[in-house]
Amino acid sequence: MIEVAGVGKSFTVRRRAGRIRRSRTTVAAVDDVSFEVAAGEFVGYLGPNGAGKSTTIKMLTGILTPSSGSVRVCGLDPSRQRTTLARRIGVVFGQRTTLWWDLPLRDSLTLIRHLYRVDAAAHRARLAELTGLLELGPFLDTPVRQLSLGQRMRGDLAAALLHDPELLVLDEPTIGLDVVSKATVREFLARLNSERGTTILLTTHDLGDIERLCRRVMIIDHGRLAYDGDLSRLRATVDAGRMLVVEFARPCPPISLPDVIVERVQGPRQWLRLPRTANAAAVVAALADRHEVRDIALRDADIEDVVARLYRQVGTLAK
Amino acid sequence: MSVFPWVAWYALRRYTAYPLSSVAESVTNTAFAFMRAYVLLALWQARPALGGYDVTDAITFCFLTQAMIGPVQIFRGLELSDRIRSGDVAIDLYRPVGLQGWWLADDLGRATAELLLRSGLPMVAGMLVFTLRPAGPWALAAFALALPLAVLVSFAIRYLVALAAFWLHDDRGLQAIALVMSLFFSGMILPLVVFPGWLGGIARALPWAALIQVPADIYLGKRTGSDLVAALGFQAAWAVALLAAGALLTVAARRKLVIHGG
Amino acid sequence: MPGGVVRVYGLLAWTWIRAAAQYPVSMVLLTFATAAVSMLDVAAIMVMFTRAPRIAGFTAPEVLFLYGTSALSFALADILFGTTERLGKHIREGTLDAMLVRPVSPLIQIATEDFSPRRLGKLVPASLVLALALPRLDVDWTAGRAVMIPAMVLAGVAIFSGLWVLTASLQFVLIDGHGATKSVTYGGAFLTQYPLSMFARDFVRGVTFAVPLAFVNWQPGLYVLDRADPLGLPEAARFASPAVAVVVCVLAGFVWRAGLRHYRSTGS
């Protein structure tokens, strides 16, 4: 579905060097990135701000022309066959709507139908289906500018799916949504992927999206692909270790033990990070030896911890 | 210290944030100044001394008034309209400062910014190509009073138009009518001295004359002595009357917002 | 393909019209208001002729004929392509990207945006003035002159449309330049309302050879009014408008594509 080989994109950035003089520097937003996505996959694309996520998405959808390397989406070259490709993919930008601000949602969707040349009967059926799944009914006739963020996002999803695309590309679809809207959107995407077989590529900052939806994650940082694989394997690769939360009888200074990193201290409670290789039982015994321990809990590191650590590792590598 | 100087200062900063854009606007203002000058030149060739202007007056009028478009804001309304339409005005109304004073300070900052960025080019270009009438020191001093008064009247009118959005479902029609009035009856399209008979009489008495025609006449030295006082008085009187009407309408708007929730 | 473009344009424009028609009172008021704004220039011309029987050697019906043809051409071009001047705004707000992921040229999407019957308000004063001016012209009506009128209006529409797209394309590179390009579009509309013989000779050369506004209505108008060209261009220039229109439109299409390519390689 998507084949990306050695793709790079660099921009010329002009900076003010003096009062009038400006210096030009070339910045590689994406640098030698390669990956493939097969039909039916649900892939999460992660990375800190400015890492190159949006630039990659723009090259996949034909908005930007790559500086180097090759991109094939649905067997087409996005930068040369942009309009042909547009009929076969759906794109949603979370931060800005692709709908028309002043038009009621229904009219926006009619415009989309004409743009994609969906015939009237197919449009009616598809609209009815999407209206049901995304619960658009109550606000179909409301101008887009009056919709809440969650309603607008559901409208945008409907707009991107009216022409029944093979591939759906989502750029931060859950950004700023409340808990309920987030859940609706996630559930909808999961069904779209499993029942209709639509391939989905999703960029996000919300690791909850990734944990609930994606089997596979790709992580980009400083324009380079830092990880591509199973979510479960990511935890093993990046040894974020385990977290030991200890509550002592009374507040005490941060614990000092070999292999143990104190992440946080809050009153009598301390969060200790243990490497996967450390012997947890030995650590607990050592703690109980020195202080009076009230309560103890051991759990795997959060996905947030895992990714934060990965970003840090890549960051030090890049320097 | 009062908050208004800060409001004006931030507006000045905001409107000078994109200097290239403003200079680009003044290029178009200048182009129109040349075209209008040639049209008036043809008219004055057919009718020298029309309306008490000579050819130099007529040409100076074109460049001067094109330089005034920015500060006096002939073409655009207030941003307040958008805030009323979107309902954001509720935030403005709950500030412990008057709505009218706030927006007046904002508009004065804007006018200063546009005077700095948009008024130079038309005047300089005009002087390079034509002989413009140089304003004497007294005329210039009087103009320095007349221009802020023009901005005040312009603000007062645009404020009234903007507040109408509280009562109108769609205020774009009113905005367009306001544009027609301010373009035609200010002298921007054609100097009011060219208007024949009763049309000229009416046009010179309406508040829009205070925006362009009156300050331009003052600059050209057409109003001196007691006549100059009358001209400035005309501007000041309209400013006071329209600002007072704006204050009354603000009270009504506030009441409407409180009772109907916007 | 051209048929497809016209069809898509029509469908998109129609959807916008239907949306606007949901508020009929506003729509009618706005149509009138738009008509009133475009009446201003003709009002100025009328006022000027109350003060002089001839201006620059032209009578009122002659100037109104020039006004009518120019205003009609400009109004039609403005209706079709006027909203392309919002390109800079779409680039700044990122909405151009949304247009680029759709299977229709972004040019058509921008041009049809906000298409409303109120735009038709601009046609009213222009056609009215032309209809009133034509019978008052003191010319020998021949078949050639009669055919020239619709031909020059159409060529004018094409020239103005090309200029809309050309000036809009500049915003791909000079995003802050919109204010200045208005002197070509709106300035061109203003200029062609008057006999070009009013303006300085170098200025007229500029709008003949550089920005070919003289071919909107001045050159063909000289033929209709049976007047000599102050620049002394050969007789063929009176009939060159359609050819000039084609050149302008082809150039506009080329520049638009180049601008879009620039945008897609720089993303800014």
Image (spheres, coloured by chain):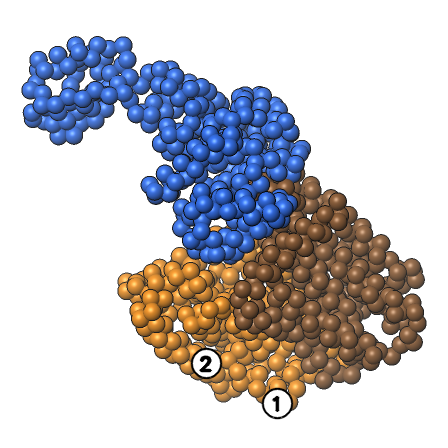
Screen quadrant of the C terminus of chain B: bottom left
In the figure, the shade used to draw chain A is blue
Mark yes or no: residue A186 visible.
Answer: yes
**Could you tell me the amino acid type at mark 1?**
Trp
**Could you tell me the amino acid type at mark 2?**
Trp
Q: Residues within 10 Å of mark 2 (few under 14, many from 20)?
A: many
In the displayed structure, does residue C205 sit left or right of residue A41?
Answer: right
Identify which residue is drawn at 50% across, 47% down.
A128
Q: For the residue labelled by badge 1, is the local secondary structure a helix, a strand or a loop?
A: helix
Residue labelled with disc 1: B198
Q: For the residue labelled by badge 2, is the local secondary structure a helix, a strand or a loop?
A: helix
A156 w.r.t. A238: above or below: below
Q: Which mark is residue B238?
A: 2
B254 w.r.t. A314: above or below: below
Looking at the picture, tell me which residue is in the foreground, C199 or A146. A146
Identify which residue is drawn at 43% across, 37% down.
A188
In the figure, the shade used to draw chain C is brown
Q: CA distance from mark 2 to mark 1?
A: 21 Å
Task: Give the chain letter for orange.
Answer: B
Quarter of the rendering containing residue B98: bottom left
In the displayed structure, does residue A144 sit left or right of residue C17?
Answer: left
